[in-house]
Amino acid sequence: MTEFTFGPILRSTETEFRFWSPQSQTVQLVVEGDAPVEMEPVEDGWFSCTVVGAAAGTRYAFLLPDGLQVPDPASRFQPDDVHGVSEVIDHGAYRWRARSWKGRPVEELVFYEMHIGAFTAEGTFKAAIDKLDHLAGLGITALQIMPIADFPGSYGWGYDGVMPYAPESSYGRPEDLMALIDAAHERGFCVFLDVVYNHFGPDGNYLPAYAPIFTDHHKTPWGNGINFDAEHSDTVRSFMIENAVYWVRDFRFDGLRLDAVHAIKDDSEEHLLKALARRVRAEAGDRHIHLVVENENNDSDLLERDADGRPIHFTAQWNDDVHHVLHIAGTGETFGYYKDFADDSAKLGKALAEGFVFQGEMMEYRGEARGKPSDHLPPTAFVSFMQNHDQIGNRALGDRMIASQPLDRMKALAVCYLLSPQLPMLFMGEEFGAKQPFPFFCDFNEELNEKVRKGRREEFSRLPGFDADDLPDPTARETFEMAKLNWTELSSSVSREITAFYRNILNVRHRIVVPLLASGSTAPAVYEKQGAAVVVRWDFGVRQLTLLANLADENVSFEPQGDMIFQFGAVSCGKAGPWSVVWSVSDV
């Protein structure tokens, strides 16, 4: 790909502006400081206008026949937020330092999910750079950045973005984001971006005013589906697919995490997801590029491998099933969807050994069967975690497990997932025992804010033990501020001890588990219950990795096998005490 379809094209002495508006007869270009000029209709609803002297830094917008002025839907930067004018950006002006960076193979990935606005007190791309050495010393190898597509207001989770090509202006300029990625690459980190292709946010999306971006042929939780298969869908598909390529090519992201792909509806011969994966992988060349999905349907078809074991479409999926069984073990909560994962320790074994707990079985909470077989996939097809932004932030108070549960329980859960052959992911602050909440927050106009407040109260009023008076106002700046990590906690003895604990585990992972994964010979894992505990075994050719997890308040007997590589809890003489975990490696 030499040029993108959407967005301005910079040339030596001029810039070509392009705008797709099949619902308009005429469109004018408004360059800041100049009178509007008529754009020339080209074909298929496109308009074009070349302006001599326009260059990086030029600010512009488009004027519709009804007098509505709109930003470029493919704006590369919105200096005055989503309702303001767009700015021309020259991505080629940034001078990359880590130019030889090619990424990391999948088995080396240890993810760290972060929200740029809440990761530091400043909440900027630049400020995040100062914390990279902390993460490097911990053993993190991949940053997982929550969505940064520009959204309305000055704070939000990012899933209400409306400018897919423009980095959120409150976090900094595009070159600041490039500097963060560059600094990460210099330290050996991959950088992943969370992208949202299933809906647009409710405030600041001007596309419906002039283009058929939606279709009533499909419905989603956010309303009409995005038009990926009806009239004019070729252009809409290009808009999204090129966006994925844009982040990987122009910003050098090492991968993408695609939000809620089960909500992307498309009846085309080639589904948008497969077309996107094909295009991104073609653009990547010899770089290690990894594509990750969030998929409530547990559709393992997206994770299939070719004859050489390489992902055909997507590299991995966030494995909510692992989270659910760990959460139940750690908290005892069984309401909502947790009920379907409760009262069976073997489900932890199945989630770690095979990926999905539900592989076509009926799930009572959904009222239908869920999932497809996943036991044939390698463990690196799954990203496991005990907390993430959703599982914390979608709780009424946004409370982390460690805020109400014993530390030893949290450590036991961490040992289970951090040494699993699946790809582990920490949520920011987990590594030092951060207890501050991560509630949902957003910054819309007052009408939408009130709808959000009402909707959250109604949603959580159905949960046991919930008092609506306790719910933080999701639209208040104070709610956003309370989510910010308090880095001064690292000076406390408890936080230092937890950080050292995580560092030790990840050191074992990189020394022992990663080489096993790199051997390329993974047979299907097996699991079995052993009293209150569960035992899982992974066969890597001549070596076998074994987990004994006793996440209960009783002793269990077990037969030690091979060399113990990590243990937690009271373990001795073939006995594993309550909340104890043992990892070992043996010859086959």
Image (cartoon, grey):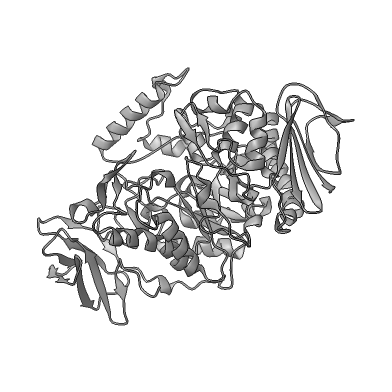
Q: Quadrant of residue 163?
A: bottom left
Image side of residue 347 versus residue 149, left or right:
right
In the figure, 246 relative to 500: above or below?
A: below
- Report the front residue among 413 and 269: 269
Q: Quadrant of residue 535?
A: top right
Residue 41 picture location, percent across and down: 15, 70
Image side of residue 466 versus residue 385, left or right:
left
In the figure, 377 relative to 531: above or below?
A: below
- Report the front residue among 446 and 66: 66
In the figure, 554 relative to 417: above or below?
A: above
- Report the front residue among 492 and 536: 536
Residue 402 picture location, percent across and down: 61, 31
Q: Residue at x 54, y 27 (%)?
A: 340
Q: Residue at x 69, y 44 (%)?
A: 420
Q: Residue at x 73, y 58 (%)?
A: 519
Residue 59 in view in this figure:
yes
Image side of residue 211 versus residue 511, left or right:
left
Can you say which quadrant of the picture contains the N terminus? Answer: bottom left
Residue furthest to the bottom: 12
Residue 271 picture location, percent across and down: 40, 55
Q: Residue at x 17, y 66 (%)?
A: 30
Residue 260 in view in this figure:
no
Residue 393 picture location, percent across and down: 47, 35
